[in-house]
Image (tube, rainbow, N blue to C red):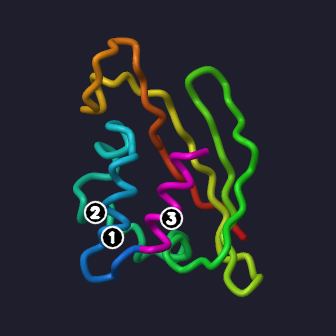
Amino acid sequence: IHVVQLQMNAFRYNNNTTNTGILTARQFASPSNRAAVGSADQFISLFDMPQYAPLLTYDSVQYSVPSADGDITTIDVVTRENGTVTGRYDFRLKKVPSEETGVNTTRADTACWMTSGVRASPL
């Protein structure tokens, strides 16, 4: 849940000029997610789409209890603005071995939870 909360806070407090929030959130995307989406500019452009734009403008957020199945976890997220639901998202996370993430660690068995995909659901 912490990974999703970090990403949601990064989106909420994104600087529209530098997109530092979006780029911070991208750091928590799994290597396979980054490969599927493409460059940082392509990742930023996702938020121009109506289904993902509410991630940048919400004033409250609700998280489901994580649903884990081995190394895969899903968390449902609902965004609201002025009490009205603006978005529903299915965050899918997977445990990625540290050697694949670029995270420096002295433990060979360390893995990081990273977002492998976010699907917008109809309102």
| Disc 2 packing (10 Å; few <14; some 14–19; many ≥20) | few
- Residue at 69% over, 76% down: 80
Which amino acid type is shown beneath numbered disc 2? Gln
Which amino acid type is shown beneath numbered disc 1? Ser
| Disc 1 packing (10 Å; few <14; some 14–19; many ≥20) | few
Q: Are marks 1 and 2 in contact (CB under 8 Å)?
A: yes
Q: Nearer the viewer, residue 120 or 58?
A: 58
Q: Report x, y in % for residue 83.
A: 77, 82
Q: Earlier in the sequence, mark 2 or mark 3?
A: 3
Q: Nearer the viewer, residue 123 or 110?
A: 110
Say the numbered circle drawn on residue 42.
2
Q: Nearer the viewer, residue 56 or 103?
A: 103
Magenta span contains residue 12: yes
Residue that badge 1 annotates: 45
Which amino acid type is shown beneath numbered disc 3? Asn
Q: Is residue 60 left or right of residue 99?
A: right
- Residue at 30% over, 72% down: 19
Q: Most prominent secondary structure in the magenta stretch?
A: helix
Q: Which span is picked out in magenta?
A: 1-13
Numbered disc 3: secondary structure: helix
Residue that badge 3 annotates: 9
